[in-house]
Image (cartoon, rainbow, N blue to C red):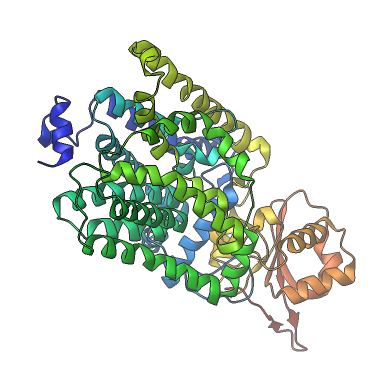
Amino acid sequence: MPAATRIARGAGLRPQRRWLPDWFDAGVLVALLLLSVMVAGYEIWQARLHHLVWTGGDGLIPMDDLQYLSWIRDVSRHFLASDLFVLRATHHDYIEPLVGVAGGLTALGLAPKYALLLLTPPIVLGLFFAVRAYSRVMVAGLWERRIVLLIAFFFGSFGLIQDNWLPFLTWGYLPAAGAIAAVVAALVAYDRARTTGRWLWLPGLLGLLASWLHPWQGEELLLLLVGAEMVLRWRPSLIAGSEPTELALPLITVAATLLPLIYYLGLDRLDPIWTLGSQAAALHRPLPALLVGFVPLLVAAAFAYRVKPTSFAQLATMVWPLAALVVYGLCEAGLGSTPLHAFGGLTIPLAALAVIGWRNSPFNGWTRDRRLIVLLVVAVTVPASIVQVARVPGIVGVSVHHLDFISLGDQRQYLADDPQPGGVLAPFNVGAVVPSETDRRSYDGDLFWSVPHEAQRNRLAALLFSGKLPKQEALALVRHSGARFLFAPCNLRGDMWHIVGRLIIRAHRFGCATIYILGSRTTDGRDVVSVRGR
């Protein structure tokens, strides 16, 4: 009899309905779903209230969201995405499942921001059911499973990086959330395949999905599975009744999980844009600063290492935090970017280990009163969740002059509808939304992808449109950029006619904003335009 069925029966549930959530699980799922759409819902409401355009930034760092949307827009036209935050032509060589599905919806007529938003509930459902299945494999008691669910999804403490509060990933970081769901589901599927000898292909398929969506999580999955298998081959008696598995399961899983990692390695080595983008996204963070927020869980989880694991899933979970440290170290050593991503979803294994550890710790006798346990769980989940939710209006509100909102109306449609090719030179806040809103390339607008010399691009564009760039330098910037359009939004002091008038052939005003068309005229009055960017 499969372990999941035994656990379900031991908890008094009907095996055939073990996937149906009870009242508690349903409450957790509803809370997750509401949290996942909270930021987007708030921003859409604010945009309507203040007669602005919601750009699709669905999180507290909208620049990353706008990058996803630019990929989606490009995939909808070319199947493979390129970098739209530079005006020169770049290779169309990037695709991943979430961007591909959203790109398909965009090709059918849905705006990229709504296509991505539409995929949020399926990702949240996948994450919830994966963690729920994982909790049933890891612990047998009903209340213990509920504690694992609550801590995995809502744990927070002083110093915890917001990225490691799991609902945060549903605010514009769906690839990371989807990858974490795939890792958890792959571990559960691997544990069952190892026990039953069936569905040997499923862990590999889920591993492939995890690596493709977010390679950091794919690397961790490889390390924790291979690490656990090596431990069992070194000490086969570690888990009672466990037998060495045939090589087919680990080989299929490892090979499938490696495929996207090889693809990303090829992008980093063969596409100069990806090389520069990876270097820009290094974002080194000291390890103590990343781990301090996990300290309460780490202390409780440490006691889990005092007892023998009872299943392969438990053994692999014990390897998981070590795998995260290895991935972090590789990124810090320059073999990857954004080391912070190595700890994405770490509250899931730590929640399970903390419950197991606490049950086997000297303190277990102090907390036999269920009311005290409830108070402890509430203390490490509810305050942090309230703090995270309370931060949202102050970060994404209209008064913050955020990239989530912009006064693009008729001018946006003009740029999208103009049949002539060409990219846009604009200040950073406008350049960030040009690709997703107009399907044109932008000179500036992304810290990681407007490369090389993004900081210099940002500074020069700001000086140009504020009128502070010397005339000769302004002419050289505009001429050498290869842009067809200058987009001067409202509240900028620079007079483009006075600064670069000799390069402008006509202009269109849209309220207080102006779009200038660049080029030159021949002696017979015809426009001559030399452009790049579409």
Quarter where residue 526 is shown: bottom right
Q: How many marks?
A: 0
Give residue 113's position: percent from left, percent from top.
Answer: 47, 51
Q: The C terminus is located in which quarter?
A: bottom right
Q: Is residue 279 above or below residue 389?
A: below
Give residue 82's position: percent from left, percent from top.
Answer: 52, 70
Q: The N terminus is located in which quarter?
A: top left
Position of residue 128 in the picture relative to residue 480 (left or right)? left
Q: Is residue 173 visible?
A: no
> In percent of the image, x 28 and y 44: which residue is there?
238
Quarter where residue 222 is shown: bottom left
Q: Is residue 408 above or below residue 464?
A: above
> In percent of the image, x 65 and y 58: which residue is there?
445
Q: Is residue 391 visible?
A: yes
Quarter where residue 452 is shown: bottom right
Give residue 466's position: percent from left, percent from top.
Answer: 82, 55
Give residue 207's position: percent from left, percent from top.
Answer: 33, 57
